[in-house]
């Protein structure tokens, strides 16, 4: 899919109905995202082949959501083994990166592997970058248990030095250029990158089963980038993005990044620039500081939960009676459902914010300094969640302040953002969020 600045990801029209996450999950398909203008010089970026490597899949996800490709073509698969990401596992059905030589049709990963093979072999794709988080810090000579030839962190991996193909066959030369570029931007000297040539053709039986080796055997330049698991998440992502940007430079792909390439900015984007919307944006939830449990959350009476997310690493899974919002390896929140019939209502709502009239649509998030007052709406009843007025069943025409709303009913852990819900009789029309600025 082609992505603009305001586009959302992963439109899930039918909720994934699973009683337990341990169930066999064949419906966790990966996302395929096209960026830029399609041409014959496409970079394919893959993250999430192993679900316990968050630096890899988070970096790929940021390319999908926070980079604009100004010239050239980039394809991104940020969540190749999405089920393993949700499970926080290297691979619930075994290591997917060892399934590219032979694989039984009965293997649960079979369809995923076959699908990614088609993208790898696409005529447009000229260079493939598979992202990983590896143990320790790779060094050509043994210095310690952490700094060793047996380690995989902080290196650019190639299967062989050269490949006889038309484009980017000088694998070692390209890998060396990427490593030098990263080493000019190290956080610590310990983080120094090296080229690691596995020389797979000389008998490395494990690497013969890998995605990159499958790619070069199909005439594609392929590399793996490893960030060390000894680093925190934002540091891993930082090094992956440095590598990705240098590969794009080498390929003549021009891009615009929507944040500064610093670990603090990366952490802010990962943790705070995230949200999920429901039912054609009738409801929108910011997730940066969302409460761990949201009670009586409106869900369509038929059980279908339609949602869009700001990240391809985000989804919702039903566990028992509750709906769990997953973001990569993290469980952000549980939704305790209030099953209710939804109605269509496109009207805008007039709300006085600190005395100033605003026209607001369902799904919006608005902020007040002191008070808000909702103008009466024909045929709609208003319920400000956490506000109690025994004399008013329809909470309109009232100047409401923050201190009048019970803090524990906020959707955020700071107690600043509250739900305003709208009903027609016993049917749900929509929700607006009201936040109080500090």
Image (cartoon, rainbow, N blue to C red):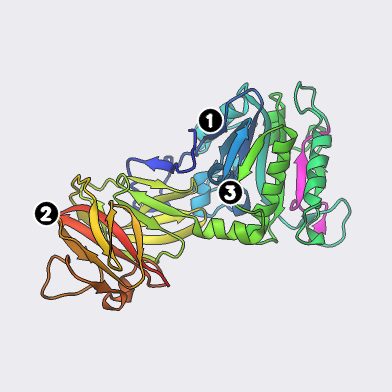
User: Which residue carries the number 2 mark?
Assistant: 378
Which residues make up the magenta segment?
146-161
Q: Distance of mark 2 from mark 3, alpha carbons?
A: 43 Å
Give the mark, 1 or 2, whose residue is nearer the N terminus.
1
Residue 308 inside the magenta-drawn segment: no
Q: Is residue 365 visible?
A: yes
Label 3: few (<14), some (14–19) or many (≥20) C-alpha neighbours in 10 Å: some
- Closer to us: mark 3 or mark 1? 3
Seen from the viewer's position, the closer of residues 7 and 190 is: 7
Mark 1 touching mark 2, by CB under 8 A?
A: no
Residue 147, image quadrant = bottom right
Mark 3 touching mark 1, by CB under 8 A?
A: no
**Quarter in which the C terminus is drawn:** bottom left
Residue found at x 30% / y 71%: 409
User: Which residue carries the number 1 mark?
Assistant: 115
Query: The residue tagged with tag 1: helix, strand or loop?
Result: helix
Residue 335, image quadrant = bottom left
Q: Position of residue 355 (x, y in %)?
A: 27, 67
Q: Distance of mark 3 from mark 1, alpha carbons?
A: 30 Å
Principal secondary structure, stretch drawn in magenta: loop
Query: The residue tagged with tag 3: helix, strand or loop?
Result: loop
């Amino acid at each position: 899919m082609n992505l603009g600045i305001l586009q959302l990801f992963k439109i899930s029209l039918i909720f994934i109905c699973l009683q337990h996450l341990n169930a066999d999950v064949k419906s966790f398909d990966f996302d395929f995202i096209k960026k830029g203008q399609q041409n014959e010089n496409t970079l394919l970026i893959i993250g999430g082949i192993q679900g316990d490597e968050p630096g890899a899949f988070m970096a790929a996800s940021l390319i999908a959501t926070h980079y604009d490709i100004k010239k050239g073509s980039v394809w991104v698969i940020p969540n190749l083994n999405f089920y393993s990401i949700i499970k926080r596992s290297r691979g619930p059905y075994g290591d997917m990166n060892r399934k590219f030589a032979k694989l039984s049709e009965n293997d649960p990963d079979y369809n995923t592997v076959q699908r990614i093979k088609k993208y790898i072999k696409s005529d447009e794709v000229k260079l493939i970058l598979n992202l990983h988080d590896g143990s320790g810090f790779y060094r050509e000579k043994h210095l310690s248990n952490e700094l060793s030839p047996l380690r995989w962190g902080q290196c650019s991996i190639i299967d062989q030095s050269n490949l006889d193909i038309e484009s980017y066959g000088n694998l070692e030369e390209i890998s060396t250029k990427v490593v030098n570029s990263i080493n000019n931007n190290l956080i610590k000297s310990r983080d120094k990158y090296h080229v690691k040539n596995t020389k797979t053709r000389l008998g490395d039986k494990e690497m013969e089963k890998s995605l990159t080796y499958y790619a070069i055997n199909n005439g594609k330049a392929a590399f793996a980038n490893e960030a060390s698991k000894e680093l925190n998440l934002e540091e891993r992502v930082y090094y992956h993005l440095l590598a990705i940007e240098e590969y794009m430079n080498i390929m003549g792909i021009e891009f615009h990044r929507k944040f500064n390439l610093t670990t603090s900015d990366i952490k802010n984007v990962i943790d705070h620039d995230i949200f999920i919307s429901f039912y054609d944006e009738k409801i929108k939830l910011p997730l940066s500081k969302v409460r761990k449990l949201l009670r009586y959350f409106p869900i369509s009476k038929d059980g279908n939960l339609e949602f869009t997310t700001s990240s391809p690493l985000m989804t919702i899974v039903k566990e028992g009676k509750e709906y769990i919002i997953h973001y990569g390896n993290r469980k952000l929140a549980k939704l305790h459902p209030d099953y209710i019939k939804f109605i269509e209502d496109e009207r805008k709502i007039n709300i006085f914010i600190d005395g100033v009239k605003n026209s607001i649509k369902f799904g919006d998030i608005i902020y007040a300094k002191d008070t808000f007052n909702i103008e009466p709406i024909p045929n709609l009843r208003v319920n400000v969640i956490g506000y109690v007025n025994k004399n008013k069943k329809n909470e309109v025409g009232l100047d409401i302040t923050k201190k009048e709303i019970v803090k524990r009913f906020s959707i955020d852990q700071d107690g600043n953002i509250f739900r305003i819900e709208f009903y027609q009789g016993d049917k749900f029309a929509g929700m607006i969020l009201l936040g109080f600025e500090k």
